[in-house]
Amino acid sequence: METLKAIHTRKSVREFLEADVPVDLIRLVVEAGTHAPSGGNQQPWRFVVCRDKAKQKEFDPYGHQPWVESAPAIIVVCADPHDSWRKDDEFSECYVLDASMAVQNMLLATHDLGLGSVFVQTFSPLKVRTMLGIPLHWRILGLIALGYADPESEANQQTRPRRTISEVAFLEDVEKPL
Ligand SMILES: Cc1cc2nc3c(=O)[nH]c(=O)nc-3n(C[C@H](O)[C@H](O)[C@H](O)COP(=O)(O)O)c2cc1C
């Protein structure tokens, strides 16, 4: 798929078919994540794949995000701050940006591979950490729920509106919209 087309047609998918996603396909998605840019090329991201619905149910103890349990697979996006680029007292949260870049690559990769996905930030990090044995010093930044999109789902058809370019982008100074 052409890159710009992939960017423009990707959307969050929250209703999935039961079908399992082969590990090889998930590996391709994760590999796309590892090709993201990172500060000082430190690559602080860490990814843990979970395909266990009993565990996935625990990730979202309040049941706010049913797609976390129903997704055939979850990629838990983490980062090891020890590997984060840092110089003197400059910005030290680089690992959050690095992992975010990896997330977007992975969302686009799922789309390109004919899968659907959604990034989820509402979950219990404590449960995720405990159930998957994630080391205490890693930050858990989010989950990517993925699977084959249910073509019958109305929710999956929805396209969420964007602010106009002139609202968010400016030319030379903030008085002039781009
Ligand atoms: C930082 C971040 C946190 C998000 N958290 C959630 C979430 O907890 N649950 C969820 O269903 N979607 C979540 N999303 C997905 C957004 O709701 C979605 O990307 C946005 O509404 C735009 O829709 P689109 O992805 O279909 O373009 C999150 C996205 C981002 C970038």
Image: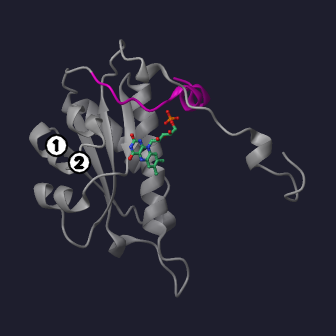
Task: Examine the structure image and report whether residue 6 is included in the region drawn in magenta.
Answer: yes
Residue 52 visible, this orientation: no
| Residue located 48% across and 77% down the image | 92
| Residue located 27% across and 45% down the image | 75
Amino acid marked by disc 2: Asp
| Above-or-below relation of 21 to 123 | above
Task: Examine the structure image and report whether residue 158 is included in the region drawn in magenta.
Answer: no
Write down the residue under mark 2: 60
Asked which quadrant contains residue 66, the reply is top left
- Read off the magenta span: 1-16
Distance from Cα at disc 1 to Cα at disc 2 = 6 Å
Write down the residue under mark 1: 57
| Residue located 38% across and 21% down the image | 114
Quick one: 51 or 120, which is closer to the camera?
Answer: 120
Amino acid marked by disc 1: Lys
| Above-or-below relation of 153 to 126 | above
Residue 100, image x and y in percent?
46, 54
Residue 158, image x and y in percent?
50, 23
Tell me the SS state at disc 1. helix
Within 10 Å of disc 1 (Cα), the crowding (few <14, some 14-19, many 20+) is some
Within 10 Å of disc 2 (Cα), the crowding (few <14, some 14-19, many 20+) is many
